[in-house]
Amino acid sequence: MITRRSWMLASAGVAAAAAAAQGGGKNVVIASGNGSRACTKAMELLQAGRDTLEAVIAGVNIIEEDPNDSSVGYGGLPNEEGVVELDACVMHGPTRRAGAVGALRGIKTPSRVARLVMERTDHIMLVGEGALRFAKAHGFQEENLLTDRARKAWLAWKESLRDKNRHNNWGPGLDAPPEERQAFLERFFPGADEATLAWAWEVIADPPTGTINCLALNARGEMSGVTTTSGLAWKIPGRVGDSPIIGAGLYVDQDVGAAGSTGRGEENIRVVGAHTVVENMRHGMSAREAVLDCLKRISRNYGDDLDRLALFDINFYALRKDGDFAAGSLWNVSRPYRGGKPRPRRFTYNDGTGTRTADCVFLYRRKI
Ligand code: GLY
């Protein structure tokens, strides 16, 4: 005989099994190549049964607070005036809510402020001075985010402009002896190792748009995502990239999946990349097919001109609700500098069996 209690328990079990089947029944976190610590932390929290948004934000906070990571949060490379300006956004699948901040100064963890915009305002996005005042009203500490390393790189970039513009007054005068690249870099980073000098030259010659995107799916099929960045190095103050733009830097649709992006934000905004990837998956594409299709749209914006496309890179990350995931890059490898080796484009993931890295699928093979 079926009692009311056993019927309810059986129904709950069937519902849980159905939800798990829809979500693939397991926890999955994926992130950009710089996100391995974020993946590990987020997975720990998912396995402890915590909310997917809480998990991804706690993951990226590790990198936002790390002074040695120059692409995100504290230690990020500044704008052309030497001021660090941060962009971030979050989306919570189960409640279908979103929040974002743009050009936020003085707060190490813009992802947390983006979450507060979502939870404690009737808005989606706050920028600049208003975003800072809002963060301070909620008890965030305003701090100088410019580390010594980032300040020196910024100063070196400013002085390097003299090569292109003799009216640039920063750096030794016309009467100073000529300087080789090595001596120039060592003036800013005395006693630094080769890796630091190579990094400094790379960020001067090819200003990066380092960013971290992290997406999570739990065993109940719930999804969330976050994207956070210090944006394009040496940007015009007030420049906002794709990272805090809902639909470009991040999109989550609880019925379908989640997507995010890193790389040159201006290209992504023009194809509303994260939303495009999610829509591709809604129409039946695998995660891999969805990111490649989006990269083709970017290529198409340049008439598939490989010489112009070679000047930048962009990456998309996709996680479907059934657990299928992939990441894709325009190019197979980064551009090499100072005789260094080109780095293969990689992303990180954790499916509950440990954090790993894997190659991104790519559209084009770079001629080196
Ligand atoms: N994707 C980061 C930026 O362009 O700011």
Image (cartoon, rainbow, N blue to C red):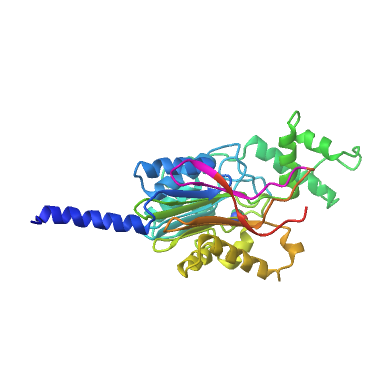
Where, quadrant-wise, is the N terminus in this rendering? bottom left
Q: Percent position (x, y) of residue 209?
A: 64, 51
Nearer the observer, 333 or 76: 333
Q: Quadrant of residue 173?
A: top right
| Range shown magenta | 340-356
Relative height, residue 116 to residue 152 (above, below): below
Q: Percent position (x, y) of residue 321?
A: 42, 59
Q: Percent position (x, y) of residue 84?
A: 61, 46
Q: Does residue 165 appear in this view?
A: yes
Q: Is residue 354 magenta?
A: yes
| Image side of residue 368 versus residue 144, left or right | right
Nearer the observer, 26 or 152: 26
Residue drawn where x is 58% and y is 40% of the image: 145
| Image side of residue 325 versus residue 155, left or right | left
Residue drawn where x is 66% and y is 40% of the image: 150
Q: Quadrant of residue 122?
A: bottom left
Single out the residue that lies furthest toward the front.
1
Q: Percent position (x, y) of residue 91?
A: 44, 56
Residue drawn where x is 69% and y is 57% of the image: 312
Q: Does residue 244 appear in this view?
A: no
Judged from the image, the quadrant occupied by ligand 1 is: bottom right
Relative height, residue 163 to residue 248 (above, below): above
Relative height, residue 145 to residue 24 (above, below): above
Q: Is residue 149 magenta?
A: no
| Image side of residue 169 versus residue 284, left or right | right
Nearer the observer, 85 or 60: 60
| Image side of residue 332 versus residue 48, left or right | right
